[in-house]
Amino acid sequence: NKKKMLSLKESLKILKETNAVIEGHFILSSGLHSSKYVQCAQLMSKPSQALKICESLAEKIKMELDEFDLILSPAMGGIIVGYELGKLLNKETIFSERVNGEFKLRRDFKIKNGSKVLIVEDVITTGGSAVEVINLLKETYKVNVIGASSIIDRSNGSAKFPVEYKSLAKIDIEVYKPENCPLCKKGIPIDKPGSRK
């Protein structure tokens, strides 16, 4: 019952069809401009297509990362992806959430000493949240973080992890300072996704 891993092309096709990756002219939350915008929640809102992507990522994790006992996702984006992978890989799945700006385990989630943990995110941009969670685990629990994983890596190679990292789709997104934006110069209408219209 081995699931076929999707090619990058097949993964991107699903990500575009579900509007998880859209093309145009966008102001990102950083204030920079870009011709692509990633919103993985759009993928996860369409369960049958999300399943194909998550099955493929689960296959990659099985093939390329060490054995583990537990999946931990930083809230918010990683929670559904973590749950779906937990179901596919038959692993317990928990999440951490920010309390006064710092990641904590709440909801009576416990991690046994010696557990091997996989960090799961939907999208990695800087890798900041995943690294914070890895540090939380190292400082607070006697566990072994075996790796980190996400559906989309849009870090352009800039995310640095203290553990092995695997993604299903690397998407290079060029960003521009507003004053140097070629899309502005062409007069392409601009959209600020993620904010209220």
Image (spheres, grey):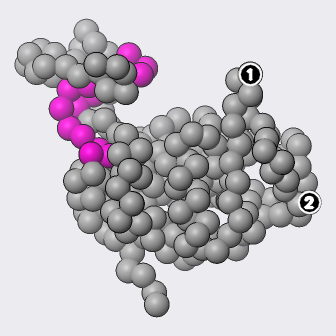
The residue type indicated by label 1 comes to: Asn
- Residue at position x 88%, y 49% from top? 141
Judge by depth and name the residue closer to the eye, 182 or 78.
Answer: 78
109 relative to 174, above or below: below
* Labels 2 and 1: the sequence-earlier one: 1
Residue at the spot of label 1: 100
Decide: is 2 above or below 146: below
SS of the residue at dot 1? loop
Residue 64 visible to an observer of this rendering: no
Horizontal side of 132 relative to 9 (left or right) equals: right
Q: Nearer the viewer, residue 102 or 47?
A: 47
Q: Which mark is residue 175?
A: none
The stretch of residues the image draws in magenta is 19-35
Instruction: Assess whether residue 147 is covered by the magenta stretch.
Output: no
Q: Amino acid at mark 2?
A: Asn
Residue at image mark 2: 113
The x and y percentages for residue 168 are: 43, 60
- Where residue 64 appears, as percent x and y from the top left, is 56, 71
* Distance from Cα at disc 2 to Cα at disc 1: 26 Å
Measured from the top left, where is residue 152 in percent x and y? 42, 50
Say whether residue 102 is visible: yes
Which quarter of the rendering shows the C terminus?
A: top left
Residue at horizontal 27%, vertical 45%? 19
Q: Quadrant of residue 173?
A: top left
Q: Residue at x 28, y 12 (%)?
A: 178
